[in-house]
Amino acid sequence: EYIDSGKYIERLFPALGVRFIAINDNYDSLKGKNQADEIIIPFKNLINDAYCRDISIKIRSNLEIKRKKGECVTPFVAFGYRKTKTDKHKLEIDPSAGSVVQDIFKMKLQGMSQDAIANRLNELGILSPFEYKISNGSRYETGFRQKEQALWSSVTVRRILENEVYIGNLVQGKRTTPNHKVKQTYVKPEDDWIRIEKNHEPLVSDRDFEIVQRLLGMDTRTSPDQKQVYLLSGIAVCADCGAPMTRKVSTVAGKKYAYYLCSANKETKRCSSHRIPEKDLEDAVLVMLKQHIQNILHLKRVLEFVGTVPFQEINMKKLQDRL
């Protein structure tokens, strides 16, 4: 950096009595500087800095091209994958870690929370992603390690559940630095990320991944003594205000009664309680599910009925829509 170079050569080294020798440039501060050095040295520092900048731009461009070609340019790959022996830019499934990832998705689909999944993995003695990389001889480092042995946590589980790499998508170029002099990184806008779909063999189907993303968007927290979420957790919402319905349990004469009520009523009173017993709500949902299944089973009959609708009614419907 030409600014710091000038500061050291002109101010800091003379003040500290440091002799500075540049062999290739035939410079020795002990001999003193002539008039030519006063011009040439700052100019050389500027040229050297420009060379570093040019190299940085070329490396960035090269990495960008590799990302767009679907080549993995990261030193460490996601848990569940490894780099192929023939091409370090291609990913293949790691049988050991890959089965753990598939189990995590299965447990989430079965209704377990992230915290319950993490506890289950720790009980089974399965190595966390950090410990697994270390056990394979990797020099991987992380700032999230809190104990001597890094254990599974709900945050780690959620990162795996949200990662597109497990459906075969390779997403790179999420973070960058302003220039070659500033080492602090920042997250780029999502539109600028490089996403190559179906770039490698997936561990999870698209359908399962989509369902898991919907589950993650719901409130599926559990109480400390519970491992699985309730049937309607994160699903039941108030029909009037759209706020989530909260499950409450009341004890009357030693008997427990569970019911759902509008969370907006409890917080701001801007909506009525809409209290409904849990049993009634689950029964109503079950009836609707059965009806929906019946409709699907009789889809052929429904399609035949639709085919018999007179064309006059269809035309009237179109006119009505236009109005």
Image (cartoon, helix red, strand yellow):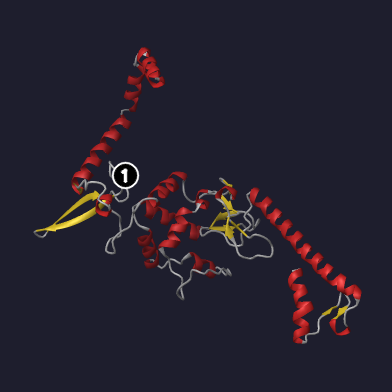
Image quarter of the C terminus:
top left
Numbered circles on residues, count:
1
Q: Residue at x 16, y 57 (%)?
A: 250
Q: Is residue 22 above or below residue 114?
A: below
Residue in the picture at 91% in, 75% down: 35
**Residue designated by label 1:** 242
The answer to whether residue 222 of the structure is visible from this angle is yes
Amino acid type at circle 1 is: Gly
Q: Is residue 92 above or below residue 310?
A: below
- Taking the spot 50% from the left edge, 48% from the top edge, the residue there is 167
Q: Nearer the viewer, residue 234 or 94?
A: 234
Q: Is residue 288 left or right of residue 61?
A: left
Image-quadrant location for residue 112: bottom left
In the figure, 28 relative to 179: above or below? below
The foreground one among 114 and 221 is 221
Relative image position of residue 182 (x, y in whole percent)? 65, 65
Circle 1 crowding by C-alpha within 10 Å: few under 14, some 14–19, many from 20:
few
Q: Is residue 38 left or right of residue 78?
A: right
Q: Quadrant of the N terminus?
A: bottom right
Q: Residue at x 41, y 49 (%)?
A: 212
From the top left corner, tell me how far across and down residue 266 is, in percent.
25, 53
Res. 194 in view: no
Q: Is residue 195 left or right of residue 181?
A: left
How far from the left and from the top, in percent, is residue 271? 25, 46
Left or right, 303 with respect to 38, comes to left
Q: Provide residue 141's location: percent of width, then percent of height.
A: 55, 69
In the displayed structure, would residue 71 be above or below residue 128?
Answer: above
- Residue 102 is drawn in which quadrant? bottom left
> Looking at the image, which residue sits at the far bottom?
17
